[in-house]
Image: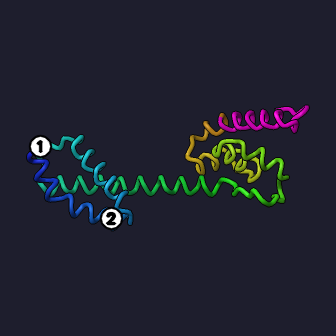
Amino acid sequence: MDEAAFHGFYAQTAQRLRAYLIHALKEPALADDVLQEAYIRFLRADIVDANFHQMRSYLYKTAQSLIADHGRKMGRQRKLHEALPEPEADRPRHDIGIDMQRLFDKLAPKQRALLWLAYVEGASHREIAAALDMREAGVRVALFRARGKMSNILDQHGWNEGAVT
């Protein structure tokens, strides 16, 4: 598709596609990002010998796919956020002493989530992988590293003397 043909196609479709995206996503800025990505993918597809309706259909399918991708991403982020323990800086937890809580908070958020899900919630590697959007085989390695990091933190603060990791 040459530049002039694309400009004509864009002029005929962009306004309505943007309105659809704003309605679907409820965020104009996000709708603009999805609109731009949909047109970029349209151009990269290099559609040949398609009529206007086929091109518009491809554009809307692409936009719908991007909306679904965004929804999945938000779901994964929500699951990760829900999996992380809520910080309670001012009051001690019943299950972990305040000193241990402070040490636990020194881990990266994903490491905290891994250890919490595995050892507090008793989740399987498969459940952890699903909650944190990881491969199941990667959970083993990530848990090993998170345990090592926690062990080092405990060592630095005198809580891990004689412990076996």
The secondary structure that dominates the magenta segment is: helix
In the picture, the quarter occupied by the N terminus is top left
Q: Residue at x 19, y 56 (%)?
A: 56
Residue 16 in the image: state x and y as whole percent. Answer: 22, 64
| Vertical side of 5 occupied by 68: above or below | below
Quadrant hosting residue 24: bottom left
**Callout 1 crowding tier (Cα within 10 Å): few <14, some 14–19, many ≥20:** few
Q: Is residue 69 magenta?
A: no
In the rendered image, the residue lying farthest to the left is: 4
| x 34%, y 62%: residue | 28
Please count the marks in the image: 2
Q: Amino acid at mark 2?
A: Ile
Q: Residue 25 in the image: x percent, y percent?
A: 38, 63
The residue lying at 84 percent from left, 59 percent from top is 94
To which residue does mark 2 refer? Answer: 22
Q: Which mark is residue 78?
A: none
Residue at horizontal 70%, vertical 42%? 107
Mark 2 lies on a secondary structure that is: helix
The numbered dot on residue 3 is: 1
Cα–Cα gap, marks 1 and 2: 26 Å
Q: Earlier in the sequence, mark 1 or mark 2?
A: 1
In the rendered view, does 89 fall on the left or right side of 5? right
Mark 2 closeness class: few <14, some 14–19, many ≥20 residues within 10 Å: some
Residue range in magenta is: 142-165
